[in-house]
Amino acid sequence: MDHFIYKDGILHAEDVPLLRIAEDVGTPFYCYSTATLTRHFKLFQEALDGLDHLVCFAIKSLSNQAILRTLADLGAGMDVVSGGEYRRALAAGCPPDRIVFSGVGKTRAEMCFALEHGLRQFNVESVEELRVLSAVASAMGKTAPITLRVNPDVDARTHEKIATGRKEDKFGVPIARAREFYAEAASLPGIDVVGVDVHIGSQLTDLAPFEAAFQKVADLTRDLRADGHAIRRVDLGGGLGIPYTRSNETPPLPLEYGAMIQRIFGDLEVEVEIEPGRLIAGNAGILLASVIYLKQGEGRDFLILDAAMNDLIRPAMYGAHHDIIPVIEPQAGVEQHPVDIVGPVCESGDTFAKQRQMPPLAAGDLVAFRSAGAYGAVMSSEYNTRPMIPEVLVKGDQYAVIRPRPDFDEIINRDRLPIWLE
Ligand SMILES: *Cc1c(COP(=O)(O)O)cnc(C)c1O
């Protein structure tokens, strides 16, 4: 469910007509709904109600400061995967003891900075990282709270590029060797073992792979306790999928996901952390674009938009589907025609949809890409020297630009000429 709906024939974000924002900021732009973000965060809170828990928003999915502040104010923790994201979480006002630091390639500098400013835990992904972290923490006279991310070798049955829990994936330590690595962790001077971590992938539309992985984590927790480790926390990662089409996908609801977690961990006396990104942010954002041309090609028509793959890369990168709807509601029963919906970038991969049935549209008309809140703005680039597009946050009948469009001078003046070219 989201808060982008037609009212009086015009698509609104909550109570604001999108035409008004488009007039004000120009297209293309991203627009987010506070009500949808809040609703999704609270669904997870309710799903884990009764368990000692923390919902850490995976900020790599959407990391604007206004979004993070909105969620931090609701009590969210943050899952960060780089020093930059750690700084974003702090800057947005997330208390350090609600920040978890994930990622396979943490550098000494990142470890040092996070230890200095504080965090809930590092989710450590290799024994090599564990040794470096111990050395860094010891040198600072500190101990680093850690979980080890275990790779449970389950197939999340999701897109190849976002499956992370099979043994051939780069993430985590093999679960079969976990006890050995925990023994080493316990012996290291700069390390304080606090729990176990797992994350098997993204856009999962079935609970079974989660359940298989979580069962293995619960068993491992018992084994590790028997080995003498004080395991008091499990971090179950993110990955719950969202419906990208309105028709045929029905991923599990947070409530069903939470009930399964309660069943597996309810009597283990552990604190449960989850790290959802996409399910909180995905349907809380849309991308607004204008039609530049309707180009009639050989046997097919192209709808050329002012948004492109550099603004939303998911279709080009993952073959992802986004529903694309006109901002002016089509008349009931209007005839639809197949068009290829593309951007202006000089790559054939800059195609959002092929032979998509669309109502008649003309140059200047506005369209909205639904479900573009997660892995949209954060993955954008300036390819073709296209400025990063603005982000707008709506709350009720108010809206604000939360990242302005840079002007071309700002972009070009970041470059420097070497002395021999001046
Ligand atoms: C990407 C990621 C998440 C969030 O995944 P979603 O599919 O957006 O919920 C959570 N934890 C880790 C470690 C990740 O890498």
Image: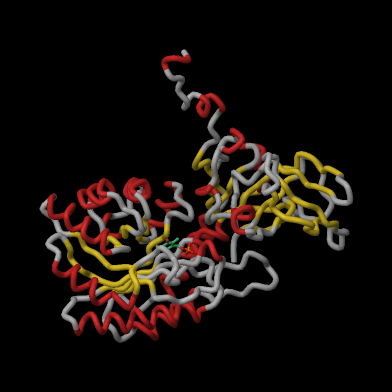
Residue 53 in view here = no
What percent of the width, then of the height, locates residue 407?
A: 55, 28
The N terminus: image quadrant = bottom right
Question: In which quarter of the view is residue 337 placed?
Answer: bottom right
Q: Which residue corresponds to the image point at 42% horizontal and 75% vertical from the top-left?
A: 153
Which colour style is shown?
secondary structure
Q: Which residue corresponds to the image point at 20% horizontal and 49% vertical from the top-left?
A: 116
Image height of 41 relative to 46, above or below: above
Q: State the residue in front, 290 or 411.
A: 411
Q: Relative to residue 66, is residue 104 drawn left or right? A: left
Q: Relative to residue 224, is residue 344 drawn left or right? A: right
Image height of 134 relative to 264, above or below: above
Q: Which residue corresponds to the image point at 41% horizontal and 52% vertical from the top-left?
A: 68
Question: In which quarter of the view is residue 229 placed?
Answer: bottom left
Q: Relative to residue 365, is residue 308 drawn left or right? A: left
What percent of the width, then of the height, locates residue 214?
A: 39, 79
Q: Which residue corresponds to the image point at 47% horizontal and 26% vertical from the top-left?
A: 415
Q: State the residue in front, 362 or 316.
A: 316
Q: In which of the image's four quarters is ligand 1 placed?
A: bottom left
Q: State the residue in front, 155 or 120.
A: 155
What percent of the width, then of the height, locates residue 26?
A: 64, 37
Residue 27 in view here = yes
Count of picture labels: 0
Image height of 15 relative to 277, above or below: above
What percent of the width, then of the height, locates residue 74?
A: 39, 60
Image height of 413 relative to 152, above or below: above
